[in-house]
Structure formats: C-alpha cells, structure tokens
Image (tube, rainbow, N blue to C red):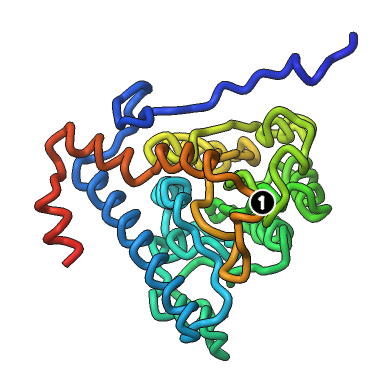
Amino acid sequence: MWMEPQDLRFEQVRVLDAEGHLVGEMPDLSDEKLVEMYRWMVFARLFDERAVRLQRQGRIGTYAPFSGQEGAQIGSIFAIERSDFVFPSYREMPALWVHGMPFTQSLLYTMGHVRGGYVPEHVNAFPPQIIIAGQTLHAMGSAWASQYLNDGRVNLCYLGDGATSQGDFHEALNFAAVFKLPAVFFIQNNQWAISVPRSRQSASQTLAQKALAYGMSGVQVDGNDVLAVYQVTKEAARRARAGEGPVLIEAVTFRHGPHTTSDDPTRYRDAEEVQTWLRKDPIARLQRFLSNKQLWDEAQETAWIR
C-alpha cells in the first residue's frame, strides 16, 4: 500500500500558550525550579545582548546570538543529569552554563583565546562544534561507549535545522537507531539556516518525522515553551537511559537576531515574520505564567537584574 507524505501527522507538544496559560499537562517541577529556569533564561538574554555590543566594539570576535532560543536550551538542559554528556554546536552557550561550564570560558571562546575551546574536567560536555552536524558523530561515539560501559549516561546532541541537511546527521541517526544507543538528538529549528528558510531545506512537513525512517522515536515540541521542552526531553532521556533507543526532538523556535554578527537578516527576512515570532517570546511566556502563579513580579525582576 502506498503511503503519502500527508499521511504523517505530528501534533506539536505544548504546555503553555503564548500568553502563559496552562494548556497541557504540567511537568513535575517545584516552584523554586521554575523560578531558577526563568532566571537562567533572563541571564542568557542579557548576556547575549551584551555580547553583541562587545562584538560591535571590536572586543570579541564573530558571535552567534541565541536570543529567542532560551526556552529550547534551558528546558532541555534542565531535563538531563550533570553526569550526562552534552554535544553543542556554536549557539548553545546557555545550555553549557547550566551544565557547569564557567561563563569566563565562553568569553575566552568568543575572543579566540587559545584556551577558549577547553572544557574543564568537571563538565561533561564536548567543545562547541563549528562544523555543521559534526557533533552528531562525536555524540554517537560517546553514546556507543556509554552503552558498552553500561554507565547509565544519556548523550544529548544539539543541532540546528540546517544540520539536518548534512550527511553526518543521517549517518548519526542511522547508527544510533541500529545499535539502540542512549542518545537524544535535539534540533533547534529556528526557521533559518543562515539565509536559507526551512522550506528550502526539507520537503517533509516536520523535521521530527525524519526519525521514523531510521526506526527511532520522534517528537515535535513548541520550542518557545520551556515547560513543554523540559517535559519531552525528560521523557526522551528516560527512554534512552532505559535502553529503549535514541529519540529525535524537533523544537520549533526562532532566532530573533542574525545568524552571526557578520550577517544582516533584514536582507532575507521580512519584518512581519520577525514580529510574529517576537509575540511568542519564550521569556515573556514563562514570565506571565510565573506572575499568574504569584511566583514572580516586576519588583523582583528589577531587583534581581540590578
């Protein structure tokens, strides 16, 4: 029997709507943990804005902003253990910080310092990978070692939507699925691979459905909903840790700024698209939710930022 692309249906997982109202099952998170996640997201945004200014002043090198993707990164990294391994691209600074990477290390990296790519021994992460999708193969080597050693570790590999067009991505998924490796592929689909839109990268309705062709589980989540991201990554990590095989997560999000500071997104993105996504800002969404629960207010935010 023939199967057509339109026969596949992926329902996007969501816990909070754009206004911060609960529309799905609330994950098991304490009030303290919710506030901690929010603070990390705000800190990441402030760091990102400052880093862009530093680059414009010539004090650091070319920089890849991540504003708009805080929900995807913080939600996913909070869902794994410090003993698990993380494989980042060049845009996952917030995730690395939560996992134990010193902020100073990130600054050295942006300055091109000889020690900038160094990862302290206590941090279970690999250096940021500039080669698109290169980290997917590194992650599978680590995942294979975890399986062989039976150490209970999950290997979380971050990548962008553009990386799904690379051969390394497909090799990694095939290898992971065949050997049922303890790996989680986390795609931050921010809609643009530099200046190439998602529609020109893949004809599939979702990136999550690519998992099915390799024989692994896949899920699409609202990447601007930090609680939904936490929820699906937690379940993906549980499956991988239990020996149930790898999982592919597609977090649908948007980068507010340029691909890097050497890029001008106004040349290929229209203002209406940007404004539409700005209204879905992950920080504002969580802030509204916390305010509704009386866990956070403007006075607290002002005092904390100062």
Q: Residue at x 33, y 38 (%)?
A: 285
Q: Between residues 27 and 22, which one lies in front from this camera angle? A: 22
Quadrant in the picture for the C terminus: bottom left
Relative image position of residue 18 (x, y in whole percent): 37, 31
Does 282 sit left or right of 116 as displayed? Answer: left
- Up-down relation of residue 45 to residue 180 (above or below): below
Visible in this render: residue 296? yes
Q: Residue at x 57, y 32 (%)?
A: 220
Does 163 sit left or right of 111 as displayed? Answer: right
Quadrant in the picture for the N terminus: top right
Visible in this render: residue 242? no
Q: Between residues 273 and 159, which one lies in front from this camera angle? A: 273
Relative image position of residue 266 (x, y in whole percent): 59, 55
Q: Secondary structure at mark 1?
A: loop
Q: Residue at x 58, y 62 (%)?
A: 88
Name which residue type carries label 1: Tyr
Residue 22 quadrant:
top left
Does 55 sit left or right of 250 as displayed? Answer: left
Q: Residue at x 80, y 53 (%)?
A: 166
- Callout 1 environment at 10 Å: few (<14), some (14 to 19), or many (20+)? few
Residue extending furthest toward the bottom: 114
Residue extending furthest toward the right: 1
Residue 34 quadrant:
top left
- Up-down relation of residue 182 to residue 113 (above or below): above
Relative image position of residue 150 (x, y in whole percent): 59, 53
Q: Between residues 34 and 273, which one lies in front from this camera angle? A: 273
- Give the labeled residue for mark 1: 268
- Up-down relation of residue 8 to residue 84 (above or below): above
Relative image position of residue 200 (x, y in whole percent): 77, 41
Q: Between residues 174 and 93, which one lies in front from this camera angle? A: 93
